[in-house]
Structures are given as C-alpha cells and as structure tokens.
Amino acid sequence: MVAAVRVHKAGGPEVLTYEDVELPAPGTGQVRVKQAAAGINFIDVYFRNGAYPPPNGYPFTAGNEGSGDVTAVGSGVTDIKVGDRIAAVFPFGGYAAERNVPADRAVKVPGNISHEQAAGMMLKGMTAQYLVRRTFKVEKGHTVLMHAAAGGVGLILCQWAAHLGATVIGTVGSKDKAELAKKNGCHHVILYKDEDFVAKVKEITGGKMCDVVYDGVGKTTFPGSLDCLKPLGMFASFGASSGQIDAFNINILQFKGSLFATRPTLNNYAAKREDLLAIAKDLFDVVGSGAVKIDVAGSYPLKDARKAHEELEGRKTTGSLILVP
C-alpha cells in the first residue's frame, strides 16, 4: 500500500482525499518510482472539478508530474535501471508516494537538477520550451506578452524569452507579483486589475504591439489578447485559469491583422519519444546553465493537497508548487 491523493467525484478542493492504495509491480514497459516530489499544475484542477472528464472515470489518483528514484523495472525496459533518477509527465498518479510510469515517458534527471526542481518544472518547463522554441520561435528583437507572468509557466517563460533576446511584457494581479516578474525577465509589468492591459501594451510598444501573446488565463483576457498583436502575430492559448474561451467567429483574426491562433498541448509536441527527450534536454540545459532559474515557491506535504489547490485557485501562489510525500 502507498499513500496517494484520490478523487472519487468531481468538485472543489474538498474532494481530494488522502488514502492508501495498492500499487502493483511495474508491468511490461513500466518503471516504479519512489517519488521525492510531485508537481502541482492547473490542469490538476480541471480534472478535479470535472472541467476535463477523467478518461477512465472515478476514482483516480490526481496529478501527472513527479520526480524520484527508480525502485523496480518491468520487462522490456532496457534504457532505465534501478537507482536512476527520473522525472515524468504522465496522466494521473502523480499525487502519490510511489507510482508506476511508462518507461518511454520518463526522462533521466541530470545530477545538477534536484528532484524538487524537476518535479516543479517538468510540465511547466517543457510547456515553456515548446511555446518559445516551436509554437512561436522567439528571437532577438521580438516583443512578447505573457499573461500571469508570476505563475509557474510565466516565470519560466519570461526568463527564457528574455534570455533569447526578446522584450518581455507581463501581466500580473498584484504589486508583489509585479516585483517577482521583474526579477524573472519581465522588462515591463502591467497590473491588469488596475490598468487596461491593451492600452498599456500599446503605450509600452509605441503602437507597434507584440509578435506573440502567450495566454494561460483564457476567458478574462480574450479577446483583448488579440488586440495586443501586430499584423501576422501569434496568439498561443495554453490554459484557462479564468475559464475556457468561448467559441468565436474566426473572421475576427482577419480583421485584427491576419492573426494566427493556436491551442497547443505538450502531449502533441512530445508525442514521440525523441521529441520528449529533446524538449527535456533543452530545458535541463537552460536551467543547468543558470539562464533560467526554477522558483519552487510552495512546498506542501502530500496530505495537504487540498490546501495547495485552495491557494492555487485563490491566486495566492507564485512560481512552481510541489507536494512532498
């Protein structure tokens, strides 16, 4: 039996239950991991509250991201062995002291990256990687708008975009978050509760607007995000912490400057193992070099997952959050 946080029905943070569950030996192609830390992400909220239905129904063990040491390997596994330090992003099972994961979804963690860093950055960091390196390839001279710049993805993406030579504009909800964003690559910060972010972007850019908007907020920042783009600009919607964006008339992209709009996910960008390894390597390299620092700002005992969700949804958190078994 291993400790885990389970969801038996959709609902608020109170449906997260801390209990013991059976964990079978790793099957063919799987490895068993004793987790040192598990990452907390907003997608965990979507599955918990029913916005995203769990594919295999209830109950399920929440969470999808973690890092730890391999304690057993199933048949057919050749490139990972007992004792290896690995991290993985895989649907469900993350909020647990131990879990089985497919070996082809696991990546080895370099010695200069801690388990806590890895657990706090795999989903968020790899999301930032594909956003700045593939969805829209950020280069020197670009102007980038990042909503929720003090959030988990935001702090990583702002640092990375600045490292690549872009001018980074971020929106945040408080002065404390503004200071944090500035320390993490944001050249200009907009307090969206007090200021019209579209007007401020226009002012900051001298009317030239942005090459790309990265938006994990959703409902409350749309369609304003489109008005922050220059003609042929890219709107990348990768989350919806304020609610999903409603269906819209695609013709508005024409009238606002022949804009591009996409809703990317890591699952597609990392579907092939070689792509997963390349994304992870790029992330580990940029963090290992010191160009991007991982801010594990909140660490909670596994049994306190409910509190972590309450604070995450209450916009009381910044940076990366982890659970520690």
Image (cartoon, grey):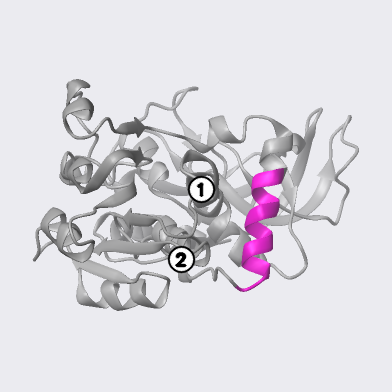
Query: With respect to residue 267, does 107 lie above or below?
Result: below
Is 284 magenta? The answer is: yes
Which quadrant is home to the C terminus? bottom right
- Decide: few, some or many residues near mark 1? Use Cα within 10 Å; few <14, some 14-19, many ≥20: few
Mark 1 or mark 2, which has the lower sequence index?
1
Element on which disc 2 rests: helix
Q: Residue at x 14, y 53 (%)?
A: 198
Residue 152 percent across, percent down from the top left: 42, 59
Q: Which residue is mark 2?
A: 162
Q: Which residue is mark 1?
A: 19
Q: Residue at x 52, y 66 (%)?
A: 163
Is residue 18 shown to the viewer in this render? yes
Q: Position of residue 270 (x, y in %)?
A: 61, 35
The structure residue drawn at horizontal position 85% and vertical position 45%, both measured from the top left corner, is 80
Q: Residue shown at 62%/66% (left/top)?
A: 287
Q: Residue 204 appears at what percent x and percent y?
A: 21, 65
Number of the front mark, 1 or 2: 2
Q: Give the overall secondary structure of the magenta segment.
A: helix
Residue 216 position, x and y percent, is 33, 47
